[in-house]
Amino acid sequence: MIKKSRILIALLGGLASLVLVSGAHAAKVGDPVAGEMQAGLCGGCHGGDGNSPDATFPRLAGQYEMYIVKQIRDFQKGHRANNDTMAGMAAMVASLQDAKDIGSYFAAQKMAKKPLVPVDKKLAAEGKKLFYEGNPKTGVYGCVNCHGDRGKGKAPNIAVFPRIGGQHRDYIIKQLKDFKSGARANDPAGMMGDIAKKLSDREVNAAANYLSAQLP
């Protein structure tokens, strides 16, 4: 069972990071018009409107601006190292303002209404229960507590916890496995890594099926 104190520490750590990011970068937000031009190279994998045509690449449409900025910066700094292609692309983003512009552009786009991969309804039902209730037997914390109802996020000013409702199933599975193995470790206070390590393969697939179905 995850101890309450550890949950609080993780949440406080994540929120503290957010305060630092917000305080440092609140002076100038992104420009979606400039971002559309900057995001031209992103379209090959993520789709021109942020709805990637391949389920292994994440949807960026409707994602929080500052979450996108954080991922670009983390790839640039080596804090996130689970995708060599993305690391190379991030290196081409010349400035923080360019990252904000890209984030602002994708945040303003509308998520597509259909999943690319068929949803397994039985697994999705299991995933919904896991998402809202967690698994007390293994100490898995309910995803809703950080990612909001249906995985649609808490609020743009709590962007350390991304919007994951409607994300591609295959992408979610890979990220959870990367968190589980330690290949990805840029989450606030190691919280996702701790949770992912306690998920069974079936739970990973169940959560991914449920979340991929949470489209507009």
Image (cartoon, rainbow, N blue to C red):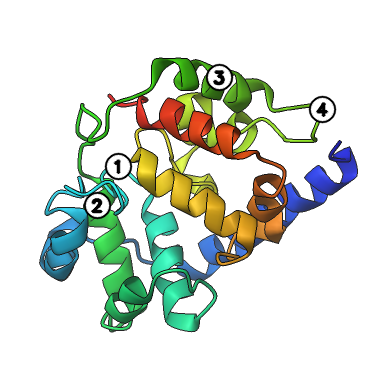
Is 38 above or below relative to 164?
Answer: below
Determine whether the residue tagged by mark 4 lies in a helix, strand or loop.
Answer: loop
Closest to the camera, between mark 3 and mark 2, is: 3
Q: Which mark is residue 137?
A: 4
Tell me how far mark 2 sits from mark 1, CA to CA.
Answer: 6 Å
Looking at the image, is mark 2 or mark 1 earlier in the sequence? 1
Task: Give the residue at mark 3.
Answer: 126
Is 84 above or below relative to 212?
Answer: below
Q: Amino acid at mark 1?
A: Gly
Residue drawn at point x = 53 percent, y = 24 percent: 127
Looking at the image, is mark 3 or mark 4 earlier in the sequence? 3
Please indicate whether residue 7 sits to the left or right of residue 100 in the image: right
Task: Give the residue at mark 2.
Answer: 106
Q: Mark 2 touching mark 4, by CB under 8 A? A: no
Tell me how far mark 4 sits from mark 1, CA to CA.
Answer: 34 Å
User: Looking at the image, which is closer to me, 94 or 190?
Assistant: 190
Bin the neighbour count of mark 3 within 10 Å (Cα to Cα): few under 14, some 14-19, many 20 and up.
Answer: some
Task: Give the residue at mark 1.
Answer: 62
Q: Amino acid at mark 3?
A: Glu
Report how many numbered discs are placed on residues in the image.
4
Residue drawn at point x = 22 percent, y = 35 percent: 116
Looking at the image, is mark 1 or mark 3 earlier in the sequence? 1
